[in-house]
Structures are given as C-alpha cells and as structure tokens.
Amino acid sequence: MAAFDIPRPRRSASSGESSVEPAASPQPSGADTQAADSTITGDPDTSPLPLVSEPAPLRWGHLEHLEKIGRGEFGEVYRAWDVQLEREVALKLSRADRRFQASGSWGGLQEARLLARVRHPSVVTVYGADHCEGRFGVWMEYIRGRTLEALLKRKGTLAAREATLIGLDLCAAVAAVHGAGLLHRDIKTKNVMRERGGRIVLMDFGLSQDILSSSRAAREICGTPVYMAPELLWREQATVQSDIYSIGVLLYHLVTGCYPVEARNLAEVRQVHERGETIPLCDRRAGLPEPFLWTVDLALAPDPADRFAKVGQMFEALKASLDLS
C-alpha cells in the first residue's frame, strides 16, 4: 500500500504563523507532495507532480544554464551552474505570483535557514538564498543518485545488513540535526538519497522545527502519516523520539516494502494505533536477525518513553547488531 501525505503548513506573511489545509481524506499516491525535493538531486525514477509550470528562465541571479528537473507546491526545481562558485547546484525557485512576494510567505527560505545550522556529510548542504527577479530561491548541492524509495522500486527489499548500514548513516545525520537544536519531522525513504558513490544524504527540511518550539503550528498534522509517531496524530509535541520512530518505519519499509500501519487515510491510521493493530516486523518478514528486529521494534514502541532516548543510542544498537548477526 502506498504512503500518502498531509499538505504542508502554509506560512502567513502577515502573522508569521502557519495554517494547514483540511486533511480529512488524503489520497494515496506514489508521488508525494514533496516529489520535487527528491528530483533536485537527480533521481531519475521520481515523477514530479503535474502542476502548472513557470517558463524556465535562462538565468536567475548568478545562476545560469537552468534545466528544470522537478516541481511541487512551492514552485520548481532546476539544475543550474553557479558562475561564482563554478559548480553545479540544485535551485529551488518559488513561483512568480503574489503569494511569494513577501519573504515570510515562502517556506523554502525557512528551510534554508534551518539547513544552514547543520553541518554533516549525510545532510544536504545549502549554499545560499536570495530574492531576484520577483522570485525567491535557495540553491544547494546537486546530488547524483536515487532516493531510497526509488532504490526499493528498482532493487526490491533490502537485506537486513544493507538496511542497517543505511540506518547507521541516517542516524548519524539525524543526530547532527538534533545536535543543531532541530527536529526533522519528515524522515522517510523519499527524503533520503543514496549518492552514486554510496553516501547517504538526508534532505527536505520543509517541515523541520526547533526542538524547543511550542507554537501551535508545531503541533499541526502534516507530512506522511504512516511514518508519524502515534502521539503526533493527536497533535502532541514533536520530539527526538518522534524522529526516532520515523527512522524505525524507514528501516521496516526497507526490508519489507510495507509499513507497520496499513491504512488508506488519516482516520484509519489513527484507528490502527488506537487498537494496537500495527504489524510486527517479524510477521512481515521471517528470518531477520534478532538484534535488527529488537532495534526496529524499540524505535517503533507506541509510547515515546519506551523508545531510544537519543538517536545515538539507536546508532549504537544498529552497530552492535552488525557484530551479532
């Protein structure tokens, strides 16, 4: 069953607050609302949303040779050449309409500011942000590779060892995000890349927030419900443990191609959690190493207090499972 998404919060330029469109009946889709965020990294298996396109500019600021590679609700994504840095970059460009005329109204700028706080080889690097020719843009490293979701579609489910190695790199990236005082809030296979050389890269910080944030917007339901910790479905505060839960779902998905929750909409996701009807990993795939099963099960504990206290502890558990398996 395909994962489905809840629309992202829309940031108000006048108040600085966010609102979320009604999400009572999200529809399953193979291409989520963040599809263009994976195409910025050269994933050939991603199908961007069929939205109306802006004419492709030949140049934007100091970026030239723009080639459109994706689009989403925020605007469009281009591969471009940075004439100042003399390197290829990915450019996320807002639409040229009134909704994006005020700097506070485009979430891409906030994403860039958050990304700039994180320095880690497994986190996508942002190079800059600017307003030019009536549009806001953020440019970042252009990664040649595939999303983990595209990898699954191409290769099929992974062995526990390969999933563990990916999990180690992802845990290290998320630890750096948490160390910078942030929560990612949208960890999933479509938001993690494997570069051609093997590097794992966490991207798409459009839903990220400060760990200490207590705003109303921080409790809005948005993202991909099958990856969300159950407490978030009842608008509780996102925490380190809710990111850990999402890592657990990602690892579960890598080795099974399925999710712990089978549901077609948000209401069904809630019902599954309320009834305690999530499907254990051992029932999805027999023969997985016990240390790997234990690690994923602990990350997916319904009560956040029963999960790993820090993502570093999950990293150590995965590392130990390699030696024990």
Image (cartoon, rainbow, N blue to C red):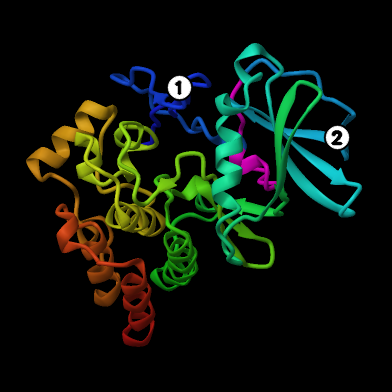
Q: Nearer the viewer, mark 2 or mark 1?
A: 1
**Residue highlighted by disc 1:** 15
The local secondary structure at tag 2 comes to loop
> Given the current orientation, which residue lies at the most extreme front position?
15
Judge the density around disc 1: few (<14), some (14-19), many (≥20) Cα neighbours within 10 Å.
few
| Horizontal and vertical percent position of residue 203 | 56, 50
- Label 2 Cα crowd, 10 Å radius (few <14 / some 14-19 / many 20+): few
Q: Is residue 41 magenta?
A: yes
Work out whether residue 220 or residue 195 is closer to the camera in this orientation and state it. 220
Q: Quadrant of the C terminus?
A: bottom left
Vertical arrangement, residue 55 with respect to residue 322, above or below: above
* Residue at the extreme top: 98
Viewer-side residue, 216 vs 287: 216
Left or right side of 97 for 284: left
Q: Nearer the viewer, residue 173 or 293?
A: 173
Report the side of 138 relative to 24 (left or right): right
Task: Say whether residue 153 is visible.
Answer: no
Task: Give amino acid for label 2.
Answer: Gly
Q: Is residue 183 above or below residue 129?
A: below
Q: Position of residue 295 (x, y in %)?
A: 27, 69
Residue at 55% across, 39% down: 110
Question: Residue sitting at 30 percent across and 72 percent down?
Answer: 292
Q: Which residues are magenta?
A: 37-50
Tell me which corner region of the image, top left, top right, bottom left or bottom right, holds residue 8. Answer: top left
Q: Is residue 175 magenta?
A: no
Disc 1 residue type?
Answer: Ser
Kindly identify which residue carries mark 2.
61
Q: Main secondary structure of the magenta part?
A: loop
Up-down relation of residue 279 to residue 13 (above or below): below
Whichever of labels 2 and 1 marks the residue nearer the N terminus, that label is: 1
- Seen at 30% across and 31% down, the residue is 216
